[in-house]
Image (tube, grey):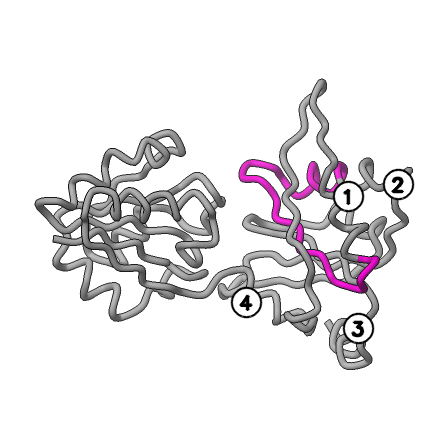
Amino acid sequence: MTFYLIGLGLDLESISLEALEVLKECRKIYLEAYTVELPYSHEEIEKTIGQKIIPMTRTMVEMESFVSEAKNKNIALLVYGSPLIATTHISLLMRCKKENINYRVLHNSSIFDAIAETGLQIYKFGKTASMPAWTEKYKPSSFIDIIKDNLKIKAHTLILVDIGLSFGDALKQLEEATSNKLKLEKIVVCSRVGTEKSRIYYENLNDLAGMEVYAPFCFIIPSNLHFLEQEFLEGL
C-alpha cells in the first residue's frame, strides 16, 4: 500500500501518463486546493482522470490524518504544479516515514520553471517572495525587503500572490508597498503560464492598471538584464 503525492502540472492535461496509471490503483484521490487558485474546476480534473476526487482544505491537509489511510489502501494527493513546492507537503512525507508508510512522489512542472518563458534566466533569480492579502489593520510588506536584497546581488525576484487576491488588488498592494521604499519601473506579470491562456506582460507599473489578468498569476521584479533577456522581454 502506498501514499502517492502527485503533481498536476500547470494545465488541465499536464498530468503525466505515469500518474494516470497510478491513479487507477488508488482507492481514494484527494486534491489540495488551497495553495493556488486553479485555472480549472475539480470537476474538470475528474473528467480528465476519469475518477472522483475529494477536495481538501488547508486544515484537512495539515492535520495529516488522511495519510494513515495508506496503511491499508493506495491513496493519492493531487497538487497543482509540482507537489513539493509548497513546504507543507514535506511534512506529509515525514508522517509517512514515522508511520512506516510507503510513499512515492510524482513530480511535474511548476511556476518555478515556467517563468523561464519570460526570457529571464532561471539561475539569475534570488529568493522568492510571497504577497499576502492585506486587511485594514494588517498590511505586511516584508516582500519588499526580499526584492531589495535580491536587487543588491543583481537577482530577479519572483513574487507569488496569495490565493483569492485579485490582480487589481495585488497591483495596488505592490504600488503602495513600494511607493516610499523602492522605485519600480518595468515589471513582468505572468498569468496562467503553461496553459493555452498563458499571458506574459512586460510593462511599466503604472500601465498595468485596468488590465484583465487572470489567476493564477505572479509578479517578477527584474534586476540587471542580460542583453538577451532585454531583447526577449521587449519583444513580448
Classify mark 1: helix, strand or loop: helix
Classify mark 4: helix, strand or loop: helix
Mark 2 surroundings: few (<14), some (14-19) or many (≥20) residues within 10 A: few
Frontmost of labels 3 and 4 is: 4
> In the rendered structure, which disc, 1 or 4, sits on the residue that comes first in sequence?
4
Image mark count: 4
Q: Which amino acid, by three-letter code, is at mark 4?
A: Asp
> In the rendered structure, which disc, 2 or 1, sits on the residue that comes first in sequence?
1
Of the numbered discs in the image, which one, if any, rests on residue 234?
A: 3
Mark 3 surroundings: few (<14), some (14-19) or many (≥20) residues within 10 A: few
Of the numbered discs in the image, which one, if any, rests on residue 181?
A: 2
Residue 15 in the image, given as x and y percentages of width and height: 33, 64
Residue 53 in the image, given as x and y percentages of width and height: 24, 45
Mark 4 surroundings: few (<14), some (14-19) or many (≥20) residues within 10 A: few
> In the rendered structure, which disc, 2 or 3, sits on the residue that comes first in sequence?
2
Q: Which amino acid, by three-letter code, is at mark 3?
A: Glu
Label 1 with label 3: CB-CB less than 8 Å: no
Could you say which is closer to the camera, residue 135 or residue 192? 135
**Residue at image coords 40%, 34%:** 58
**Residue at image coords 30%, 36%:** 64
Picture quadrant of residue 152: bottom right
Label 3 with label 4: CB-CB less than 8 Å: no
**Residue 162: within the magenta?**
yes
Label 2 with label 1: CB-CB less than 8 Å: yes
| Placement of 59 over or under 9, stated as above or below | above
Classify mark 3: helix, strand or loop: helix
Q: Which residue is mark 4?
A: 113
Classify mark 2: helix, strand or loop: loop
